[in-house]
Amino acid sequence: VDTEQLPLSSSMVEGHSVHRIATQHTRRLCGRSYKASSPNGRFAEGARLINGRSFSRIEAVGKNLFAFFAAAGQADVVMHVHFGMSGRWSVEDAAKAAPAKDTTRLQLEGHGIVSSLSAMTVQHGGVEMFEKKRAELGEDPIRADADAEALWERVSRSKKTIGLLLMDQGFFAGVGNIYRAEILFVASVHPNTPGKALSRAEFDRVWAASVKLMRRGYEEGSILTVDKAEALALGRPGLRRWIYNSAKCGRCNGRVASWDVAGRTCYACAACQPLDPSRAEEAEAAAPPKLFNSHCAGESLEARLAQPAKLRVAELREALTAAGLDAGGKKAELVSRLQAHRLQGADAAAAPAPPHAAKPAVKPATTQRPIKSARAAAAEKAAAEKAAAAKA
């Protein structure tokens, strides 16, 4: 990984992002001493203890960061960070650094840079704190010291489903809800299969998918779970994920089901991840997924236009206006209107022309314009005008 290309500020959700921050800060912060302060006062004692110490190293384990601050002849001070859903640890040039926010727990200053940390959990202790917390965490697919054999022994004895175990940081450290859906899809394993019912081959597929997909996320800086070659073979080069937050499977186009598991939405494709009734029970209240615009797994406007429920209200209004349709009403109405428009367009494209039909001199009033955003329509118009001017 070319760490020079990694951004120096990122929102944290799943383990691959935490590892990227560890790489960034090893390069940019470690090996120096800093003035430490706690702008919002919620890490005042910790900031006082690490003030002036050398930032010696930083380690990522799952969704957790451990920063070590050293001083000659003294025990290390260790800072434990867990970002939650939207933490941030930025590094900026001092001349361009933004002021500290109300959420800034720690600020490091020196050597021409300012580093600001906001997170759900920021606590300090000694090396024994690190060792205790490290022992509580499971195997991290991104780490070179991950022990798949030890994990298999624990998983194979568990009555919990593999869908629950993947989200249990004491088993699979760093896996979150997006990766759970995609890992199990790639491994062709149903989320409701109990750990003790998994074959060794199934576990190996789950672990291999965890390593492959999360390391790709670390390298690319985004959750990309579809191999480029397969996306091209399917005729969908822009496909990024298989089933997460999707109504249809990216591979077989079959129905994706979703249901609640411990307060989080679980996904599965019935065709690609068949459930064995002799080993697992059907999910209660399984239903088509409620689609949304995910900030953690972003999609292009073009991709979201194909699933209108993922569009923001402003984008829905733009698309409807561009299609010559009424853009008034609440979001549910806008989504329904745009979906109906898409279905009409698909039906019209699929219907065969009647034999010997005369070509109408004027387009019927019911003809629908293709869906696109107002911005896309404006861009096309500007390009056409530019081309016409060039010919003139």
Image (cartoon, helix red, strand yellow):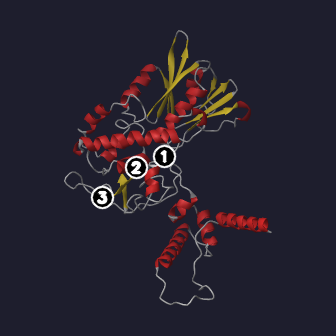
Q: Residue furthest left?
A: 278
Vertical relation: 229 (above or below) 291: above
Vertical relation: 23 (above or below) 380: above
Which amino acid type is marked by label 1? Ile
Which amino acid type is marked by label 2? Glu
Q: CA distance from mark 2 to mark 3?
A: 21 Å
- What residue is shown at x 67% (from left), y 24% (from top)? 110
Q: Residue furthest right?
A: 392
Mark 1 burial class by Cα count in 10 Å: few <14, some 14-19, many 20+: many
Q: Residue 362 at what x, y percent from top left?
A: 63, 87
Numbered disc 2: secondary structure: helix
| C-beta proximity under 8 Å, tags 2 and 1 | yes
**Residue hosting label 3:** 284
Mark seen at residue 129: none
**Residue hosting label 1:** 223
Disc on the earlier residue, 1 or 3 = 1
Question: Which of the image's four quarters has the C terminus?
Answer: bottom right
Q: Residue furthest top?
A: 73
User: Would residue 175 be seen by someone viewing this image from the given angle?
Assistant: no
- What residue is shown at x 68% (from left), y 23% (from top)? 111
| C-beta proximity under 8 Å, tags 1 and 3 | no
Q: Residue 40 at what x, y percent from top left?
A: 62, 34
Judged left or right of residue 206, residue 39 is right
